[in-house]
Image: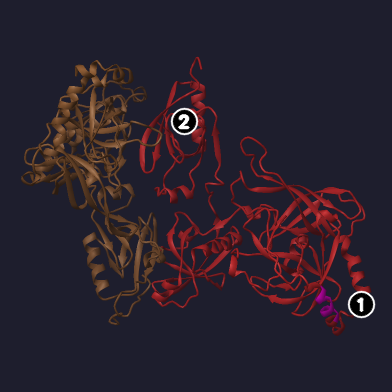
Amino acid sequence: MRRRIPMVLLSLPGATIATLMIFIAAGASAAAAATPQSLREVYQGYRDNVVAITYTLRPKEKPTGGDGRKVEDAICGIIVDSSGLIITSGDPFPDPGGDPKTTLIPLEFKVHLRGGRPVDAEAVGLNRELNLAYLRLKNPPKGIHPLHFAENSKLDVGDPVVVIGLMSRNYDYEPIFYTGIVNAVLSRPRRMYSLDIFLQDLSIGGVVIGPGGQPIGIVGEDVLKEVPTGDRTPSNVLSIFGSLTQGARVGYPMVFPFVDFAADLTAPPALDAGEKRSWLGIVMQPLNEDLIDYWKLEADGGIIISSVLEGSPAEKAGLKPGDIIVSLQGEPLRVTKDEELADFRRSIERLGVGKQVDLVYLRQGARLTTSFPLDEAPKTAWTAEELKDEDLGLTVREITIDDIQGQNLEPTTRGVVVSELEQAGWSQLAGLQPDDIIESVDGHVIVDLASYRTQTDRLREDKPEGTVFFVLRQGETLFVRIKTPFAKGR
Amino acid sequence: MSFLMSAPACAAHHGGGAYAHQDKIFEARDRVLPALVHIQPVLEIYRAGEKGKIAVTGSGVIFSPDGYVLTNTHVVGKAERLTCTLDNKEEVDARLIGVDPLSDLAIIKIDMQKAGKGVRHAPLGDSSKLQVGQVVMAMGSPLGLARSLTLGVISSLDRYFPESLLPTGAVTGTYNTWIQTDAAINPGNSGGPLVNLEGEVIGINARAIPIFGENLGFAIPINLAKEIAAKLIARGQIARSWIGVSWQQIKGLGEHFGVAEDQGALVGGVVPGSPAAEAGLKAGDVVTAIDHQPIVARYEDELPRLQKQIADLPIGKTVSIGFIRDGKSLTAQLLTRDRPSADASELECREWGFTVEEITEEVAQALRLPDRKGVIVSGVKPNSFADESGLRRNDVMMVIEGRPIDSLTGYEQIYRDLVKSKRDRVLVEVRRGRLRTYHVLKPAYDQEKAPAEQPGGRQP
């Protein structure tokens, strides 16, 4: 069900067993696991800790006329304590800030314990950085066996490992055993390990057992900041997993060592922690190679500030249009193309509200540094609160930063934005248009949804034959008289 | 006439109506057809970042003994060459006398000495005396088919269309309502005469609605054309007074503003910094008199007349303006100004792959620019250096190579200098909405690069 780009090398696992054998035979600490017998013991020892989790995806907000899209899917997880805490992939959870009508959120989690009935579970935590989620069984049955990770989770290239994941629903989520070796050790954005195994979908969230026969980590998905296309896909990658929920979220399967998520197991990060997106409050232009050459800069990329938004953290920190950000959290930026701007934005969003951001920027050739805390990003048109006015046949929402930017409005513009018009409704018939900004109703100034509600409640009470809206449309103002359905004899 | 009147087949097919006037049709035809002009201009167009040429076809009508021809701005505007074919099939060149995008009218002149035998001028009628249902003929070159005549009636008078845009992007149709006719009007008819049975030109055909509709043609009333023609012939251009108000009809809104709906016009908005803004007018004011003349726009089709009434005020004159605000009658003094020119000069920057346009006051208002500094990128040639640098249409170029741009002339000087020195790295600073962006143009000039200047510079 996941979008997968299978690479060749399907025959590799067989070959690796041989390789594994050789290495295991050579490694003193792994001697215990050197035989098929001991491999089987590893499998039998941990297979019951690996569970299938099924869930239903539904739109966050019920779309008009129906329940909307409904999808059932499954992921793999590991039971990590006796109270029924489960660590799994964060894949089912959407990125924050999407359109609530189309964004799917996971509900009705069921955990399939081996040899038992599915048990209800609920999401209790989400680590967006690692794309890991935490569930807890609602009524944990007695005698569940949690898995304990080894404290030392360090691996090196060539280390043999075992992965236990699951087969698909067609095979009743049967545990599946893989052997492989670590074929790369990554240090950025944090320590993780690449394996030479072609892992099936339901192995994301599976357990990784190290050379000592101890569980040392989880198969995670290193979510790519940029979706590879065509020739840019590295050919040495065994498989790339794309999320069903988040079509654009694509990642490589990697071993996430225990040390990365150890703290989460005692206190899982709050589910909505990532809902609050942090922002800098700038509009960006990539520092392309031509500009680097022209200004003779020593940089591999960066971000030119095109605009600093009013009241934003960037403004408070004194950043100005024309400044060029060349480093974030000590890491040089490599942004040179428009499509890479999203990576930077995401990095900022993931830092989180209140976190300190360290920037190096260039101003008139001088290299300056700044460090300041991030604020919560304001609402976007998608996440803005809406108000449906059934009587007048329109939906309005708060003015957002998108409107200010998109319609080139004064930052001080107040009012509500027409987001939807009922077909042949009173407002549409009167000539109101989408994106009109309602500034007043019958002469009463509208500043936000609350004042719009107050005024339209007054209409419902007074029942006039018509009401006059004062709207801003593409920079020009006009009055629109809307007949109301309140008058007698309707 | 009697022949046709008595022809049962015709009567049966056509209800006898139009054919009852056969003799009058012939007479009217003979008065106007010899004045009909088939115009084949070669227009200068700026498209996708390049200056180009295009040959079009339109129509026109000679209306004076000395060879002045009425037509549309969208037919002859920015014409490089004007070739006309007359009723006697003679081909003559014409000279552009003046265009007026706001009314979409234009005047060209042909040399009557060279026109040859049989070419005459047509009399102009009075469009205030027209009636719905009146028989009219359209003459012109539909789809290039010269000397065509079609017949119909006036379907409607005072048809209102909100301001629309000419192919050049200029606003038009501000000051007139339209004569609607079912006489077939097709592309190529533009600029041709709409003629009554007296053989008088009563309108200049300019528009049609070909999609979803049939026999929906629209002509500019001749009374407006007569006035514009006289001004264009006298001065080559039209000066209009401007106060900066966007008007709305009072119908339906009077009660809300506490005024009777038989007087006044509603101020929908005021352009910041305009005479109306300076006089203190605000959205929601109901203006009842300007310069002691009563103002009324009860229905929207009365708005063009109101616009014209204001345009006809003397420019640079203080006029009193009477209005109602919150139920109180107030008066303010207002200093009229010249209407901002809609005609922007354009320049092709062939070496760099884009075209630029001066920032007129009108454009500055439309794009909500804080001032008129810089030039506007009016088009970018696909796959050019400019395109690759990320330059886009409607970007405002503010600074080139550290040199601020104040006007199109200033820009042109900088452009010529840089091209002359074959600068192969050009840094452009652009205003895009509220954003400021930077672009490096990397033009490759035809000849060898001049090593004179080392490109590059400091981050601004």
Residue drawn at the location 22% of the way across and 67% of the way down: B413
Where's residue A470, x and y in %?
39, 34
Drawn side of residue B278 relative to residue A325, left or right: left
Q: Chain of mark 1?
A: A
Where's residue B209, x and y in %?
35, 35
Q: Which residue is under mark 2?
A: A427
Q: CA distance from mark 1 to mark 2?
A: 77 Å
Between label 1 and label 2, give the one nearer the viewer.
Answer: 1
In the rendered image, which quarter is residue A60 located in? top right
Q: Colour of chain B?
A: brown
Residue B343 shown in magenta: no
In the rendered image, which quarter is residue B202 located in? top left
Q: Which residue is under mark 1?
A: A35
Q: Is residue B313 visible?
A: no
Check disc 2 and report its element: helix, strand or loop: helix
Magenta segment: A14-21
